[in-house]
Image: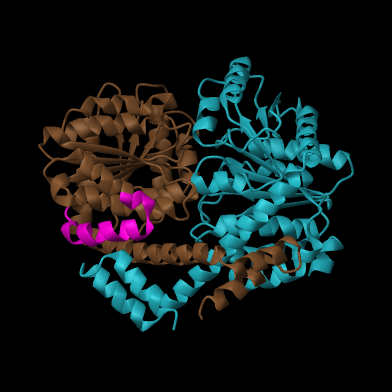
Chain colours: A brown, B cyan
Amino acid sequence: MLDAGRAGDRSAVARLLTLVERGGDDAAAVDRVVFGASGSARTIGLTGAPGAGKSTLVNALIAEVRAGGRRVGVLAVDPSSPFTGGAILGDRVRMGDHVLDDGVFIRSMATRGHLGGLTVATPQAARVLDAVGCDVVLVETVGVGQVEVEVAGEADVTVVVVNPGWGDAVQANKAGLMEIADAFVINKADRPGASDTRRDLEQMLELSVRSPEAARPEVATAVATSGEGVAEVWQVVERAYGHLEASGQLADRRRARLEAELGRVVAARLAARVAHLAAGGTYGEALDDVLARRVPPWDAADRLVSGSHS
Amino acid sequence: MLDAGRAGDRSAVARLLTLVERGGDDAAAVDRVVFGASGSARTIGLTGAPGAGKSTLVNALIAEVRAGGRRVGVLAVDPSSPFTGGAILGDRVRMGDHVLDDGVFIRSMATRGHLGGLTVATPQAARVLDAVGCDVVLVETVGVGQVEVEVAGEADVTVVVVNPGWGDAVQANKAGLMEIADAFVINKADRPGASDTRRDLEQMLELSVRSPEAARPEVATAVATSGEGVAEVWQVVERAYGHLEASGQLADRRRARLEAELGRVVAARLAARVAHLAAGGTYGEALDDVLARRVPPWDAADRLVSGSHS
């Protein structure tokens, strides 16, 4: 499947990503093939509040990256319900611009309800796109929520997308995005308030604490629907990338991410063991004790976990 | 501490909640004391996008519940960064209205970066407030994000707060809130578009799939800043509650929640074991193999997890 994917077979890539989303032994089998073949793609995270125009910006950036001849993969990490789907607002529709370009692969990730699902699956899915030959992998996430902010910070470079108007920069700060941003884009910059938002961002950046080797994030403005400013956004991303490479931070980040990923996969494997336990009789007894309010959940859990040793 | 908390000692309650937030053995010790003393409070979740005015509505509902003589606990589950804090927008400031009322206990929960932190700590924190004598526990969450929507659905009754204007109902649907809502509040209803938003919500409710015994969620309108409509919001909540009790769904929900909680606590305990493993030499070797790209994370994890048996 990896060879087929490299040769441009989209359905092979799609199948690999489905196995990754499933997790467990399926994901393990994919990683055995993909891990050694990955490590060269640049991963760029784009995050921001719902409605900030991230998908439109991703769409515009695809064109920008393709103009440079490079292959692009996109992972849209969408927390919306699987059955109502992310399609209701038509966000993904414009992505159809690139549907006939076989240098572009777009995938919407949906692993809702899966313990640690997104945080485990997303880096591995990015590796699949890397291994099949994508030079750039764009990861689009909703930048509100604990898991989503965590996923957003998993890329080499993280771009936070905000809109003009009072409070948007403040909300980004509140959601913990200020700390993971390598660059900001004020999208929909043709609306009133763009300069106020820039001033808010610059003020917050002034106040924020960064490590001594970290560059101050640049703030770009764009109107993704018309393509205005998109080339500049990409230049800002490339400058952020260049700084991370030159300062050695890129290697450090990748190391730290792999370390965190190992911890999460171990946790996922242990969680699978819990599910296995849950199918057994001892678990039923423990649950009955909790439901009858005889034993608190923590004590019942400890009884189960220590029992799983033997 | 439990007795002191019941007698109205706020610092004792605060200390119990801090132990719960810490998780692990501290949380287990609290639950041993609290679990048997809980089970009578009504828990009401309020959720919605950032800026929907949830805190203001909570503040107004506190007054409403207090007017009925009942004690109220509030858990504000805030995904914002611990060091920038949630205070920047001043959301919490108005909560100060109740600072001198010892029938009200308000706590902002912050467990960012803690694996499974919010989902494990929130139900247990609600039990603490229950055990110290709160009749009603209001849980305020940001309704965007996988973890937050999960936490929002953990209450007896879940209220989704939206604002007038195109797209707000659609965003709520997209975030998976339609499926967990027992009632809707259109807050800031003095702004244009309230009737359109009501129509959008009613249409989505018409199309949504519910179990046969479930009541169709009511839609209330309010202007929380002025208190307009807040009494009606509380009546809608009480009616939803009454229906859940009469139909037996409340007991089913509480059972299902405890079952899910047991699973999460088991996972948290296993995760703690991972951390313990991580401090050992074998983990370091596995990590080195991953960082050198010799072994993929899944295989390294399996080696560690199977090794932890012995």
In the rendered structure, which segment of residues is drawn in magenta? A19-40
Residue A21 sits inside the magenta stretch: yes
Q: Is residue B150 left or right of residue A10?
A: right
Residue lying farthest to the front in this orientation: A281
Q: Residue at x 86, y 46 (%)?
A: B70
Residue B89: percent from the left, percent from the top?
57, 41
Q: Observer-nearest residue: A158 or A10?
A: A10
- The answer to whether residue B126 is above or below residue A98 is below
Using the rendered view, name the quadrant where residue B246 is placed: top right
Q: B77 or A211: which is nearer to us?
A: B77
Residue A114 point in image, percent of width and height: 46, 51
Q: Is residue A275 magenta?
A: no
Seen in the picture, residue B160 relative to B186 is either above or below; the reply is below
Left/right of residue A307 with respect to residue A104 in the rendered view: right
Q: Residue furthest right?
A: B69
The image quarter containing residue B39 is: bottom right
Majority secondary structure of magenta residues: helix
Q: Nearer the viewer, residue A251 or B160?
A: B160
Residue A180 visible somewhere in the drawing: no
Q: Residue at x 56, y 23 (%)?
A: B207
Q: Position of residue B91 (x, y in %)?
A: 63, 41
Would residue A262 be found to the left or right of residue B264 on screen?
Answer: left
